[in-house]
Image (spheres, coloured by chain):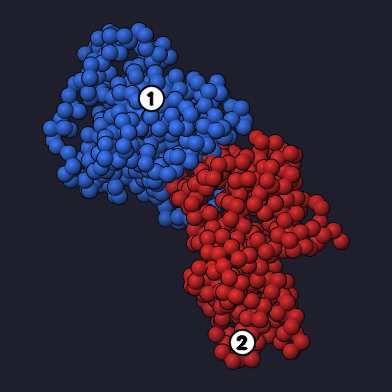
Amino acid sequence: MRELSYREALNEALVQAMDADPDVILIGEDIGTYGGAFGVTRGLLDRFGTGRVIDTPISEAGITGACVGAAISGLRPVGDMQFSDFITLGMEQLVLQGARMRTMFAGQVKVPLVMRLPGGAGTGAAAQHSGSYENWFVHVPGLKVVMPASAYDAKGLLLAAIDDDNPVIFCEHKLLYNTRGHVPEEAYREPLGVSRVWRRGRDLTLVATSMMVALALEAADQLAGEGIDVEVIDPRTLRPLDETPIVESVIRTGRLLVVHEAVETGGFGGEVVARVVASEAFDYLDAPPLRLAGKDVPVPQSEVLEAAAIPQFRDIVRDARKLARNEV
Amino acid sequence: MQNAARESLPQCQALKVLGPAGLKASLASMLLIRAFEERVDQLYLAGRTRGTLHLSIGQEATNVGALHALRAGDRFFSHHRGHGHALAWTDDPRRAMADILGKSGGFCEGFGGTMHMADVKSGFLGGNGIVAGGLPLSTGVGLAIQLRAEDAVCLVLFGDGAANEGALHEALNMASIWQLPVIYICENNSYAMSTPVNRSINVETISSRATAYGFPGFTIDGNDFLEVFDCVHAAASRARKGGGPTLVEALTYRIKGHSRSDRQAYRSREEVRRWQEPDRDPLLRLEATLLHAGIVDEEELSAMRLRASDRVDDAVAWAEAAPAPDPSGLLDHVYA
C-alpha cells in the first residue's frame, strides 16, 4: 500500500487541486521557496509560479483579507497561517468579513476559501506558537471547521475543503506532519460533515480530534487487554458536526469520553456532551459524560509543564478506565 | 476656496468623459443623495428606522465623483457611511430605502441595513461596519483582477478614522509590492466620530503616507466634483495600464453628526454653517459650475431638484409598502 506522511498528503492535495483548477491559488508567508513553515507547500512555487503561489509580507490581516477578496471574485484561495496562533491577527477579516458577508448581503456572494492553520502543542514553542483554536471558529456561523487526524483524511478533507463554496478553517497539527499512513494517489474527497468511526467497541464511546485520535486508539488497544472495549470516533469536521454516529454509539455503550487538546473551558467537548445529553442517548447513559482536554493555562515551554497541560496517553487510559468501571 | 475648475470646465476630464448629459446625471445623483439623506434623517427622528445611521450630507461630491469615474466591470468597497455610494452607483433609492427600513426588496433583504448594502453583480462589493474592513478585501479583488488580466480596477472608500487602522498599512503595502489595480479613496470629512484629524495624525496630510508605500498620493478638494472625478479617473487609467495603486485623500466635511447618538459637542455651529456656504457646499458648487458653463439653466435645475425629491417620496412609499423579510429564511444564506 502506498504510504505518505500527513505533510506529503497535504502537498499532494494542493498539487492535485491546483492542477485541476486554475482558480486555486495559495497565499501566505514563506510558502514559495521556503516551502511553508512546515514544508507543506514545498515544490509548488516551481510547479505553479509566483502568480499562483503568492508569498506575502508578514501581514496576517492582509493575507486573510486577500483570501476573502479573491474568493468573492471567483478564485479559490488557500491561505497559510504559518502558525494557527497568528490567525488572531486576521480575525476581523475572517470572522467579521469572510464569515458574515454572505448573510449580510443576503446570499449575493460565495466565499470559497480555505485557511490552513498549523496548530497544537508538543514542540516546546510556548504560549504563542502552540495553540488549538478550533472552537473559536466552531462558534462562528458561516465558517466550516475541519480537523484531520491522519494522512488519508488530510488529503481527502483538504480536497473537499477546496471544493467547498464556504470559508473552511483547516486545522492541522504540527506533530502529525511526519506521521505516515495509506494515501491513494488519485484525487479522492472525504466529505465534510461526516464523522469517522476508527474502532468499534461496546463499553465506552471515546470521541477524539486531531492528535488525540492516535493516542485514543493506542489507549483503546491497551484497555482491550483489560477487557474494556472502546469505540473511537473522530468527528473530522467540527462544524458542521455529524453527531449521529456519536449518539448511536453512546446508546450502545452508555458511556462518553471526549478528548481534545484545546483547553477544556468553552471547548468542543462541551458541545459534544451537550448534544449527546440532549439526544435520545440520554436515557442510555450509565455514567456522567466526561471531558479530557487541555488544562486552562497558556501552553508552557518546558517539556514537563507542557506535558502536564496537554492530555497524554496515560491520561486517556486513566479516564477511560475510570469511566468504564463506574468510578466517576 | 474658490472653484478654479468653474472657469476651466472645458479642460476637465469630467466633461470629456461624461459629456454634458453625464455631468447632469452626476449632479442629479448628488441631488438625489442630499434629498435621500435629509429624508432618512427625518425618518430617524420620527422613530421609523432601527439601528444606527451615518449620513453622507456634505460628502456628495466625493461619493459621486469617485464612483462616476469608474466604469462597468470595475468594483468598489464602500464603508459605514455608504448611502451616497449605493445611490451614486445603483441610482436605486427604492432598494436603499428598503434596506434602511429593514424591508424585503432592498439590496440585503433585512440582513444588512444601513451599513451593508451591496449589489455584487454590478461591482458594488458592499458597505462595511468596520472602518478599514474593505481595505484588505480590496487586495484580494485587485489580485483576482490582475491574475485574470481583466481590464478593471477596484476602488475602496474609507474615512479619515480608518487611516489609522493597522489594516490600512498591510493592504497598502501589499498592493504596492504587487502593483495591484486598487484606488484608495480616503474621504477625510474632518472628524473620526468626535476626534478631529489633526489630533489623530501628526503629519500634514493622510495622502503623504502613500510615499512610504511607494505609490502616488494626492490631497484634493473633495467638495469639488470635477476635481474628484478627474483625480480618480486618472488614477484608474494608470491602474488599468499596470501602473499600480493610488491614494486619494478627498477633503470634505460631514454636515450631520457621526451617527444618531452624536450631540456634536466637539464642534461649533458656526463651523458647520461655514461648510454649508455656496463656496463650500458640493451641490451648490457643481450647480454654479454647470450654470456658468451653460450646461443647465435655472429652470432645469429646479426640475432636477424636484425630481430628486419626488424619487425619494416614491422610494419611501415603495419601501414602506414592501413586505417585511420572512423569518423562515433566517438561516438561508449562512452557507452556500
- The C terminus of chain A lies in quadrant: bottom right
Residue B21: image quadrant is top left
- For residue B218, the mark is 1
**Would residue B270 appear left or right of B89 to someone viewing this image?**
left
In the picture, the disc for residue A323 is: 2
The answer to whether one can see residue A305 in this image is yes
Q: Chain of mark 1?
A: B
The N terminus of chain A sits in image quarter:
bottom right
Q: Is residue B157 above or below residue B325?
A: above
Looking at the image, is mark 2 or mark 1 nearer the viewer? 1
Question: Of the residues shown, which amino acid type is indicated by label 2?
Answer: Leu
At numbered mark 1, what does the secondary structure look like: helix, strand or loop? strand
Q: Name which residue lies at 31% across and 37% down.
A: B202
Q: Give residue A255's position: percent from left, percent from top.
A: 62, 83
- Same chain for mark 2 and mark 1? The answer is no
Point out the residue furthest to the front here.
A302
For chain B, give the colour. Answer: blue
Name the residue: 75% across, 80% down: A221
Q: Is the residue A117 above or below the residue A309 in the image?
A: above
Q: Judge left or right: residue A162 versus residue B324.
A: right
- Taking the spot 59% from the left edge, 92% from the top edge, the residue there is A327
* Residue A165 badge: none
Q: Is residue B306 left or right of residue B65?
A: left
At horizontal 75% and vertical 55% (from top left) the residue drawn is A9
